[in-house]
């Protein structure tokens, strides 16, 4: 499995423009919510342990499963649980280097990370078969950027409202030192620093199915250029 880094990829949510997805709805987004401390550490979700030995593909799988759970969450509590998993796999130190615009580090991370699911909701809303299709499409490549190891995983997202269309999403990962670690020997973990849509690229047409029509009836298109929070 090979892929080349496309410098023309449209950055949707990454460290450099993390704030563009958070908007200015701090009160509406965080009212009455205690935002927990977010640290890079070993965690286990969906039966997958994400420590220093975990691969980039394993981190992507946990992220995609959490995004799917988020998008399809029946209650606010279920969505909060899914967001907590996304916070566990985010590159907290990389993302928090941006200016916080009057917010605390944890508020900044929460507002940004909680915008990932609404951005891809149109493509992930549906049952386990949709989740399985996305997970089965993952193609990950590791390389260096400025001398630092990075990974990019491409996801094929079919469009439930248009079986002949779809998009590619890119999950970018970096290696981050675990909380409390320091020095060249410190354990490093793959963590997610951004989610992209790759413009001008569409997956091959998918066969027409009744399932696609059923899902499409409840789907709402995501705005790739300016994703917004969708309340539950």
Image: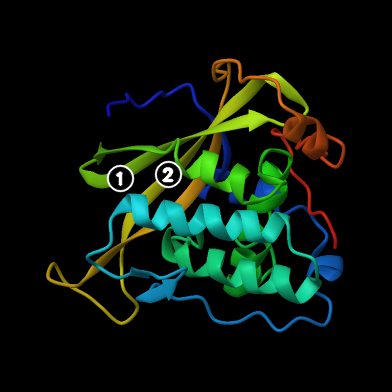
* Residue ranking furthest to the left: 185
Give the camera-side residue of 227 and 156: 156
Give the camera-side residue of 144 and 167: 167
Left or right: 100 with respect to 7? right
- Please tell me in which quadrant of the rendered image residue 50 appears: bottom left
Left or right: 182 with respect to 120? left
Give the residue displayed 48% in from the left and 21% down from the top: 8
Looking at the rendering, in which quadrant would you find the N terminus? top left
Separation of residues labelled 2 and 1 (CA atoms): 7 Å
- Residue 232 has which mark? none
Numbered disc 1: secondary structure: strand
Q: Percent position (x, y) of residue 58?
A: 36, 56
Q: Percent position (x, y) of residue 202?
A: 57, 18
Give the camera-side residue of 216 and 223: 216
Give the residue displayed 44% in from the left and 53% down from the top: 61
Give the camera-side residue of 58 and 200: 58
Give the residue displayed 85% in from the left and 60% down from the top: 231
- Examine the rendering and report whether any part of residue 53 can be seen: yes
Left or right: 144 with respect to 48? left
Which residue lies under the disc numbered 2?
172
Q: Percent position (x, y) of residue 195?
A: 53, 43
The image shows residue 34, relative to residue 20, as above or below, that is below
Numbered disc 2: secondary structure: strand
The image shows residue 214, relative to residue 168, as above or below, that is below
Confirm or deny contact between disc 2 and disc 1 (CB under 8 A).
Answer: yes
Which residue lies under the disc numbered 1?
150
The image shows residue 155, relative to residue 5, as above or below, that is below
Give the residue displayed 16% in from the left and 72% down from the top: 183
Q: Earlier in the sequence, mark 2 or mark 1?
A: 1
- Please tell me in which quadrant of the rendered image residue 139 appears: top left
Structural crowding at the residue carrying mark 1, measured as other residues with C-alpha within 10 Å and reported as few (<14), some (14–19) or many (≥20): many
């Amino acid at each position: 499995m090979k892929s080349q880094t496309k410098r023309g990829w449209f950055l949707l949510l990454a460290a450099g423009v993390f704030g563009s997805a958070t908007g200015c709805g701090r009160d509406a987004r965080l009212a009455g919510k205690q935002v927990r401390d977010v640290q890079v550490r070993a965690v286990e979700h969906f039966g997958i342990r994400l420590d220093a030995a975990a691969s980039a593909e394993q981190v992507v799988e946990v992220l995609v499963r959490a995004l799917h759970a988020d998008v399809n969450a029946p209650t606010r509590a279920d969505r909060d649980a899914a967001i907590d998993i996304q916070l566990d796999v985010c590159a907290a130190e990389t993302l928090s280097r941006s200016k916080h615009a009057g917010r605390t580090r944890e508020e900044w991370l929460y507002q940004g990370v909680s915008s990932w699911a609404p951005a891809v909701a149109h493509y992930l809303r549906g049952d386990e078969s949709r989740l399985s299709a996305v997970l089965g499409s993952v193609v990950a490549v590791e390389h260096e950027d400025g001398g630092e190891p990075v990974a990019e995983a491409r996801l094929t997202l079919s469009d439930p409202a248009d079986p002949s269309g779809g998009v590619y999403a890119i999950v970018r990962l970096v290696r981050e030192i675990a909380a409390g670690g320091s020095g060249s020997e410190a354990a490093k973990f793959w963590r997610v620093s951004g989610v992209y849509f790759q413009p001008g690229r569409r997956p091959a047409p998918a066969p027409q199915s009744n399932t696609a029509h059923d899902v499409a009836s409840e789907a709402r298109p995501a705005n790739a250029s300016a994703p917004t929070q969708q309340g539950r």
